[in-house]
Image (cartoon, grey):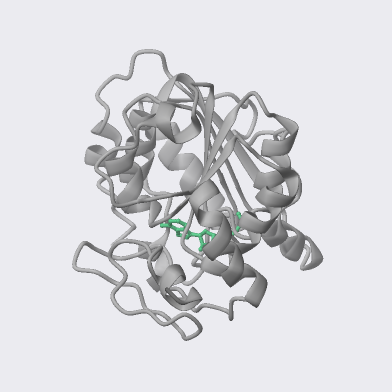
């Protein structure tokens, strides 16, 4: 099988049309996506990484639910990162914390290829990668109450009001993450988009399952584990202010989906 076919095999479920190096529109009858994949060209090394390394680090997203013990070959604390971009900060985090398992979900294949190369270089035994839409796959693939930490660093800001409906972090997704987090599990979010930060904070404060660990204005200090990400560095060059949020899942979750029901994803289309 050629490299192009091998890479295509790992397209996220629901991809409407795809070509390795062309613009890709990913829309489906299921709803509005939080991403539009305008793929940059995959380098030859990234294509080769898919062909040679996917079997070691990649997870088949076609299954009904992941068997985490089988996936990692052990059962340790589990961290989920959604939208890792080029994965450099995720790879560094996993390398610095070998006793914890890390699962990264991303739809941008050049970024996944980049992370595969990093993972091999660092010899990471505690990292697995899913090439899938988190909005669809977290619900289906992850058992409830399996995550010790969820991290979403610099989700696509979709700054135009007419695009807010594409934003990943909305009440229904927050309620879903609460179901997948262990009691006392952490949710760490960073963004440099001020109005997105305020809407995320408002939604999280309104969600009965999550407790804010920050005081004062509700924003937290940067988590010690996080290295500056690529998107963050770009924002820093533009003078953007970074907002951090750090919540924990309450021990007994009240009514898991009540936040979404009450707030109804009202600004999200
Ligand atoms: C603005 S970038 C930030 C990347 C990285 N975290 C950083 O800080 O450099 C947002 C990333 O989220 C990914 N993304 C957006 N929606 C997603 C979804 N539903 N599932 C998985 N990844 C998604 C995008 O492909 C993109 O790489």
In which quadrant is the N terminus drawn? Answer: bottom left
Left or right side of 160 for 94: right
Who is closer to the viewer here, 215 or 46? 46
Q: Position of residue 157 (x, y in %)?
A: 53, 62
Q: Which of these two is toward me, 128 or 222?
A: 128
Q: Which residue is drawn at 28% across and 19% down?
A: 254
Give the percent coordinates (x, y) of residue 245. 59, 37
Task: Please name whichever residue, 257 or 98, is drawn nearer the observer in this view of the structure.
Answer: 98
Identify the residue shown where x is 32% and y is 28%: 144
Q: Quadrant of residue 147?
A: top left
Which quadrant does the C terminus fall into?
A: bottom left
Is the residue 50 above or below the residue 87 in the image?
A: below
Residue 161 is at least partly visible in this image: no
Q: Quadrant of residue 18?
A: bottom left
**Residue 265 in the image: x percent, y percent?**
29, 50
Please identify the residue farthest to the top as the structure is shown: 251
Q: Which residue is drawn at 49% across and 67% down?
A: 158
Residue 180 in view in this figure? yes
Q: In this view, does 49 lie above or below 183?
A: below
Indicate the position of residue 27 as horizontal and vertical percent values. Answer: 29, 72
Q: Image check: 4 left or right of 33?
A: right
């Amino acid at each position: 099988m050629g490299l192009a076919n091998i890479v295509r095999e790992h397209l996220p479920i629901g991809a409407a049309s795809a070509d390795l190096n062309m613009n890709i529109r990913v829309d489906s009858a299921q709803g509005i996506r939080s991403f539009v994949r305008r793929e940059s060209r995959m380098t030859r090394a990234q294509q080769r990484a898919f062909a040679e390394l996917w079997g070691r680090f990649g997870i088949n997203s076609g299954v009904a639910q992941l068997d985490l013990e089988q996936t990692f070959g052990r059962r340790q604390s589990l961290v989920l990162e959604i939208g890792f971009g080029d994965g450099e900060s995720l790879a560094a985090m996993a390398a610095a914390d070998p006793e914890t398992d890390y699962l990264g979900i991303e739809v941008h294949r050049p970024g996944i290829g980049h992370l595969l190369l990093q993972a091999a270089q660092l010899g990471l035994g505690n990292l697995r990668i899913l090439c899938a839409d988190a909005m669809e796959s977290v619900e289906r693939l992850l058992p409830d109450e399996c995550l010790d930490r969820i991290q979403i660093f610099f989700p696509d800001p979709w700054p135009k009001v007419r695009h807010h409906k594409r934003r990943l972090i909305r009440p229904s997704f927050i309620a879903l993450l609460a179901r997948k987090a262990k009691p006392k599990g952490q949710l760490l979010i960073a963004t440099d988009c001020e109005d997105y930060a305020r809407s995320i904070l408002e939604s999280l404060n309104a969600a009965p399952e999550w407790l804010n660990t920050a005081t004062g204005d509700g924003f937290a200090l940067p988590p010690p584990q996080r290295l500056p990400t690529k998107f963050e560095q770009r924002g820093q060059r533009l003078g953007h202010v970074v907002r951090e949020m750090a919540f924990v899942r309450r021990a007994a979750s009240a009514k898991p989906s009540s936040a979404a029901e009450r707030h109804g994803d009202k600004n999200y289309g």
